[in-house]
Amino acid sequence: MTVPTVQVSDVPGELPEGAVLLDVREDDEWAAGHAPGALHVPMSEIASRLDELPPDAELFVICRSGGRSARVTQFLNANGWDAVNVDGGMSHWAATGRPLVGEGDTAPEVL
């Protein structure tokens, strides 16, 4: 099965209404650095937290490099969502100068 994919450069800097950047990394990765305004649901919790995802939203699914987010994208599309994988993940996000925010006193980074 082909997974719909976009490059980081194709993700709008400001998401339009009805679009969500879904970060599926683990809690420590999220805390270290994430995109402002992203929704955080770790991959391991997706199936039990589907009710937190807007049913009609376009979901841009992101992880560190694109592997986990590809699997989540495939799962979401099979279950009725409109999801696309962000190729290269947060590693490419940071490398292209996109904004990062973190939790705590240290500069945000991608783990």
Image (cartoon, helix red, strand yellow):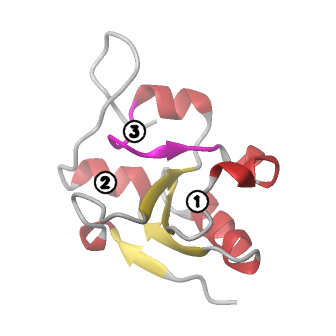
Few, some or many residues within 10 Å of mark 2 (<14, 14–19, 20+): many
Mark 1 lies on residue? 54
Q: Is residue 26 above or below residue 61?
A: above
The structure residue drawn at horizontal position 25% and vertical position 66%, both measured from the top left corner, is 12
Mark 2 lies on residue? 93
Magenta span covers which residues? 33-41
Q: Nearer the viewer, mark 3 or mark 1?
A: 1
Q: CA distance from mark 3 to mark 1?
A: 20 Å
**Residue contact between numbered discs 1 and 2, judged by CB atoms under 8 Å:** no
**Residue contact between numbered discs 2 and 3, judged by CB atoms under 8 Å:** no
Is 97 in the magenta? Answer: no
Q: With 74 as the anchor, is 6 left or right in this view?
A: left
Q: With 20 as the anchor, is 74 left or right in this view?
A: right
Mark 3 lies on residue? 34
Q: With 17 as the anchor, is 111 left or right in this view?
A: right
Amino acid type, mark 2: Trp
Q: Nearer the viewer, mark 2 or mark 3?
A: 3
Task: Say whether disc 1 or disc 2 marks the residue closer to the N-terminus.
Answer: 1
